[in-house]
Amino acid sequence: MVAGKRPLGWPLLVALTNGRTGISDERLAAAVRDKVILVTGSSYGIGEATARRLAAAGATVLLVARTADQLQLVADDIRSRGGTAYVYPANLADPDAIEELVRTVLAEHERVDVLVNNAGKSIRRSIADTYQRFHDIERTNAVNYLGPAKLVLELLPSMRERGSGHIVNVSTAGVRTPPMARWSAYLASKSAFDVWLRCVAQEVRGDGVTTSTVYMGLVHTRMSEPTPLLNKMPGLTPEQAADQVCTAVAERPHNITPPFVRPADALGNLLRVPTDRLLEQYFRRTGGGKKR
C-alpha cells in the first residue's frame, strides 16, 4: 500500500499496533554522549537508522555488518555530519569472525558500553517447501541466535570487569504472540535468543550489566519487502523503529512491547488450542495445507 493510498488515520493505526515510543534528542544525548556503542546490522534498515541517530547524539558508533562498502557509505555520511563512526565488516554467522571482531574493537576502543544486537535474518516458508532446505534452519539460527549469543559471550567479560554495560536485543513481536505457519525457522531462532538472554540477564545484572529487549512490531524494510502481505499492513519506518531502539539504549527498560502484543500473548496462552486451530484455517485458506 503506497503512502498516497493509505486511509485517513493511518499514522494512528500504526501507533496503536506497533507503538511509537519516542525519546528527545536532549535525553538521548545526555545518555549516550561519549559512549562506545556497537550496532550490528548497521548497513541498512533499523540498524543504519539507529547508528545515525546515536552518532548524532554524540556516541562513538561501531558499525558492524557483512557489507563493507555499504558500511563505509554510512560511516562517511555520519562523519560528514559531525558524528564519529568506525567500520568493522564481519560475518556474525562465523564464530571466529566474532572473536576477531571483539579483539579488534577492544584493542582500538578499550570498551563497548552498549551492544545493540540488531542483525537478523528473516524467512517465511512453509514446512513443505523446507523438506530439502534444512539450511534455512541452520542459517536463521546462526544469525538470529548463535551469532548474537557468541557476541554477548565475547563482550560480557570486559563489561562485568568494568561493572558497566548494556545489551539491547532487537527482537520481534512474533516471539510474544501465537506462532504462525510459515514462520517456524525465523520465530524459533528469535525465541531462542530471547530466552537465552533473559536467563543471562539474571546472572549479570548484579555486576552492573543490564539488558533490554525491543519486541519490534512490523517495520517496512528490505527484509519485509519480499512478503506482499506485510507491505499492506501498518508498520513503522526504520527511523521510527530506531527511535524505539534508542529509547532502549538510553532508558534501559526491561522491554519495549507494542500495544497489541500483551493482549495477544494472554489470549494466545489462555485459548491456545482454538488459537492454533484458527491460524491453521488461515494457513489453509491462503494456499497452504496441500501435501507435497
Image (cartoon, rainbow, N blue to C red):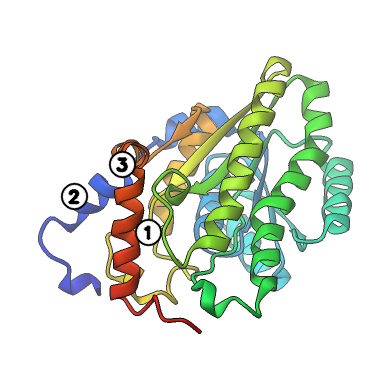
Image quarter of the N terminus: bottom left
| Dot in front, 2 or 3 | 3
Q: Which amino acid type is marked by label 3? A: Leu
Q: Amino acid at mark 1?
A: Thr
Task: Name the residue at 46% across, 81% down.
Answer: 291
Separation (CA) of disc 2 from disc 1: 14 Å
Circle 2/circle 3 CB separation < 8 Å: no
Which label is found at residue 12? Answer: 2
Q: Element under label 3?
A: loop
Q: Which residue is under mark 1?
A: 237
Question: How far from the left and from the top, in percent, is residue 66?
Answer: 72, 67
Q: Which mark is residue 55?
A: none
Q: Is residue 85 left or right of residue 106?
A: left
Query: Would you call the spot at circle 2 few (<14 residues within 10 Å), some (14-19), or many (20 or more)?
Result: few
User: Where is residue 285 drawn, in percent x and y?
Assistant: 28, 74
Secondary structure at numbered mark 2: helix
Q: Give the class, few, some or many, for how many residues have Cα within 10 Å of label 1's Cα (few <14, many ≥20).
A: some
* Residue drawn 44% across the image and 51% down it: 174
User: Of the residues under marks 2 and 3, which one precedes in the sequence?
Assistant: 2
Mark 2 or mark 1: name the one nearer the start of the chain: 2
Q: Disc 3 marks which residue?
A: 271
- Percent of width and height locating residue 160: 78, 24
